[in-house]
């Protein structure tokens, strides 16, 4: 059977880690601020997309994962833990 959600029903693995890293950024970065930083890197996301990623309601593409890792100053492997 095809499975595209975690056992906990979330649509992504990285959302909780994205939220953790965003909240630990100095100076503090809001979801809107993170969306702005991602847009500066050419990734077309808005505050609502960030909220849905962090809550596990939205799938994350490999391209998005790569840019998230760059902006959050981490690796893709770290986001997938």
Image (cartoon, rainbow, N blue to C red):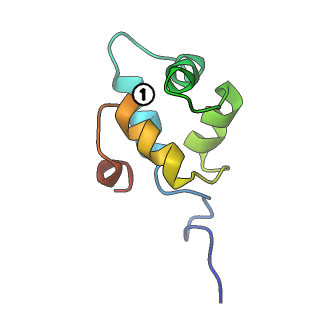
Local crowd size for mark 1, using a 10 Å CA cut-off: few (<14), some (14–19), many (≥20): many
Q: In this view, does 32 lie above or below 79?
A: above
Decide which of 74, 24 is in the foreground and name it: 74
What's the residue at 52%, 27% (across, down)?
A: 38
Image quadrant of residue 28? top left
What's the residue at 66%, 25% (across, down)?
A: 47
Image quadrant of residue 77? bottom left
Q: In the orientation shown, which residue stands out farthest toward the front?
A: 42
Residue 36: x, y in percent?
A: 56, 18
Decide which of 30, 9 is in the foreground and name it: 30
Q: In this view, does 65 lie above or below 11?
A: above
In the displayed structure image, the side of residue 42 where residue 66 appears, left or right: left
In the displayed structure image, the side of residue 10 where residue 80 appears, left or right: left
Q: In the orientation shown, which residue stands out farthest toward the right?
A: 48
Q: Where does the N terminus fall, quadrant-wise?
A: bottom right
Q: Where does the C terminus fall, quadrant-wise?
A: bottom left
What's the residue at 64%, 31% (across, down)?
A: 44
What's the residue at 32%, 14% (across, down)?
A: 26
- Number of labelled discs? 1
Residue 12: x, y in percent?
A: 55, 56
Residue assigned mark 1: 22
User: For the residue labelled by badge 1, is the local secondary structure a helix, a strand or a loop?
Assistant: helix
Residue 71: x, y in percent?
A: 39, 29
Q: In this view, does 3 lie above or below 8?
A: below
In the displayed structure image, the side of residue 42 where residue 68 appears, left or right: left
Q: Is residue 72 above or below residue 37?
A: below
Q: In the orientation shown, which residue stands out farthest toward the bottom?
A: 1
């Amino acid at each position: 059977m095809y499975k595209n959600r975690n056992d906990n029903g979330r649509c992504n693995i990285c959302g909780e880690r994205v939220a953790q890293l965003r909240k630990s950024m100095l100076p503090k970065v809001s979801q809107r601020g993170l969306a702005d930083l991602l847009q500066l890197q050419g990734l077309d996301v808005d505050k609502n997309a960030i909220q849905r990623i962090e809550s596990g309601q939205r799938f994350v593409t490999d391209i998005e994962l790569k840019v998230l890792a760059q902006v959050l100053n981490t690796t893709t492997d770290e986001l997938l833990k």
